[in-house]
Structures are given as C-alpha cells and as structure tokens.
Amino acid sequence: MVIINPGNPSGCVYTYNHLNKIAETARKLGIVVIADEVYGHLVYGSNPFVPMSLFATTVPVITLGSIAESINKLLVYSPFPPTLIQGAIPQILEKTTQDFFSKTINILRKNLEICYDKLKEIPCMMIPQKPEGAFFAMVKLNLLLLEDIEDDMDFCLKLAKEESLIILPGVTVGLKNWLCMTFAVEYSSLEDGLGRLESFCQRHAKKIYFNRINSSRSANSCWNIKPCSWC
C-alpha cells in the first residue's frame, strides 16, 4: 500500500487516527506500507504531520523522503553544475537552521491564503478543501459558467496562449475538469498570475447566463444548480 502524506497534489494531511486505521488495514491484509513523506516538513494547517514510522510496530513501513524538496530552489534553480551542489549538501544539511524552514512555511501559508481568497472571487472555480500541506491546490472548474471552453485541457491551452500563464490540467492526475495549481512562487508573481487567471475567466464567462443568475441569486449558488459531469 502506498500513501502520500502530505498529499500531492491535494495538500491533505492525514490525522493520527486515519494513519492508524491504514496500518491496521495493511496488517490484516499482510502487506507493506510505503509512505511518501517528501513534503512532511511543509505543513501549515490544523493537522500536524504524523510520520508513518510511528506505526512500524503494527506493520512494516518503508518511508520515502527527499533532500531536493527541502532545499528545492537551491537545487533546481542553481546555475552551478550538479557536482558542485552535491558537494555542498553536507554543509547545507549541517548549517541550515530550523528558522529557514519556519520562514518557508510562513511564506507558503501567506501565499495559500492569498490564492484561496482570490479563487473564491472567481465564480467558475472552487477549492473543495483548503490545502494543509505541500504547495499545491486542486481547483474544481465549472464549465457551465464558461463559453468556448471544452474541458480542463482546453482551458489550460487557451490560458497559456492568451495570458502566458501555465496551469496543469487536472486530467494529467486523473481528475478531468479540475486544475492543479501551485502557490510556491514569489508574492508578486502569484498576485500577477491570479490577476491574469481572473481576467481570462471574465473574458470567457457566459455573459447572458451570468446576467440571469445575478438577477435572482449569487454566483456561488451556480455550483448547486444540477448534477453534471464535473461534480
């Protein structure tokens, strides 16, 4: 059994009780639990991160981690050759203080609030669950409120062409008509990107449909009109 905690790309963080039930289920089935905990250090919601290794006495656990995710920008965006970075890793691990991670979490928490609040203002989008870890958000796309948009892939292609903004279509992670966004960017870039996203959605909104809706109900109630393929 493979679990990803914190979730990627959902951003969910499993509770102790939930992980305990997973361990008990795996024990009954006689299987090993492989725990992907790459984003274990990036948690900022109400649920604390609980390592699966706490349940190793119940079931065999193999834990996966990543240095690259902990110092992501240094390793991914550095102009220096990989061998130089590899040589620096011992010093990085030794001298990187907890303060570095605390500041990173605070930045991500602030960015999440900005992203979450802004997306709530865009009628055709909704985040069913606010992320509590990692740095991704899964956003539900309501095609009923858009014109000339066939699906999430079409949405992302036109968004890239018209606004030079790249968002991952949900179909790539098995969720059609969803969007996978990241808020792990500089504040100015995040603000600019959200502004472009809002402009794109306004430009492709069904104007007549919205006028009819706004005359009798709020735009948010459009999510409860009737069951359809994106529910």
Image (tube, rainbow, N blue to C red):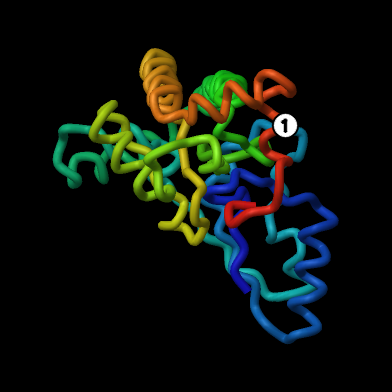
The quarter of the displayed image where residue 218 is located: top right
> Who is closer to the viewer here, 3 or 34?
3
Q: Which residue is mark 1?
A: 221
Q: Answer above or below: position of 62 versus 227.
A: below
Along the line of sight, the residue nearer the viewer: 125 or 130:
125
Query: Residue furthest toward the bottom?
Result: 30
Figure check: 115 above or below 80: above
Quarter of the figure with the N terminus: bottom right
- Label 1 CA crowd tier, 10 Å (few <14, some 14–19, many 20+): few
> What residue do we see at 25% from left, 34% from top?
77
Whether residue 152 sits left or right of residue 142 in the image: it is left
Q: Which quarter of the figure has residue 228?
A: bottom right
Q: Residue at x 68, y 28 (%)?
A: 220
Residue 94: percent from left, percent from top: 44, 35
- Measuring 65% from the left and 26% from the top, which residue is drawn there? 213
Query: Who's the residue at 66% across and 20% down the image?
Result: 214
Amino acid, disc 1: Ser
Q: Is residue 180 left or right of residue 213?
A: left
Above or below for 106 versus 6: above
Q: Is residue 42 above or below residue 36?
A: above
Q: Residue 65, how many percent across, how many down?
A: 50, 54
Residue 144: quadrant of the picture: top right
User: Quick one: SS at disc 1?
Assistant: helix
For the view shown, which residue lies furthest in the top direction? 188
Give percent across and percent down for residue 63.
57, 62
Q: Is residue 99 visible?
A: no
